[in-house]
Amino acid sequence: MKVVTGVVGNDIHVVANRLIDLSLKARGFEVFNLGVNTYLEEFFDAAVETGAEVLMISSLNGEAEGWGREVKALKSRYKGLDDLIMMIGGNLVVGSGKAEDIVPRYKNYGFDLVCHQIDLNTGLDMLEDFIEERGGIAPSKLTKTEESSAS
């Protein structure tokens, strides 16, 4: 399963980005990492170009909300992304905020999964559960035989 990931906007948290990349690969995902300081349009372009099933955006400086508000409108301009799983995680607001306020707001922006200040492994568990709820099989749960036939 293909994932496009990176850090949105004027955010240069390269260490967290690298940990996300390594953790996704360890779970069997094929990762296309756009790095840091990435414009929202670049994420969607990469999802189309790679045929990714998951778009995972991270932000640690809290500025993701300004970009996140554009997700629905931007996604609607691209063809073939109706089934794309949209996930965002990190510190999603400048200052402080409660997850019970932040999560619904980001879901309204068009994200399927929102991980505000949740540890990486918990977030990736949420992703795998979501994939299975949609009828898919998370890469970490594939047997060697299934992996061979899936590629």
Image: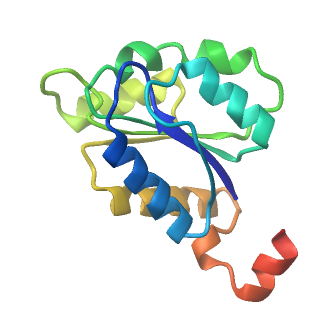
Q: Residue at x 31, y 19 (%)?
A: 63
Quadrant in which the N terminus appears:
bottom right
Question: Where is residue 28 drawn, in percent x and y?
Answer: 60, 69
> Is residue 133 among the parts visible in the rendering?
yes
> Is residue 56 among the parts visible in the rendering?
no
Q: Is residue 26 left or right of residue 118?
A: right
Q: Residue at x 73, y 40 (%)?
A: 83
Q: Quadrant of residue 40?
A: top right
Q: Quadrant of residue 120?
A: bottom left
Q: Nearer the viewer, residue 94 or 111?
A: 94
Figure check: 81 above or below 28: above
Q: Nearer the viewer, residue 31 or 98?
A: 31
Figure check: 12 above or below 149: above
Q: Residue at x 24, y 37 (%)?
A: 99
Q: Is residue 79 left or right of residue 41?
A: right
Q: Is residue 27 left or right of residue 81?
A: left
Q: Residue at x 71, y 26 (%)?
A: 45
Q: Quadrant of residue 44?
A: top right
Question: Where is residue 95 drawn, in percent x and y?
Answer: 13, 22
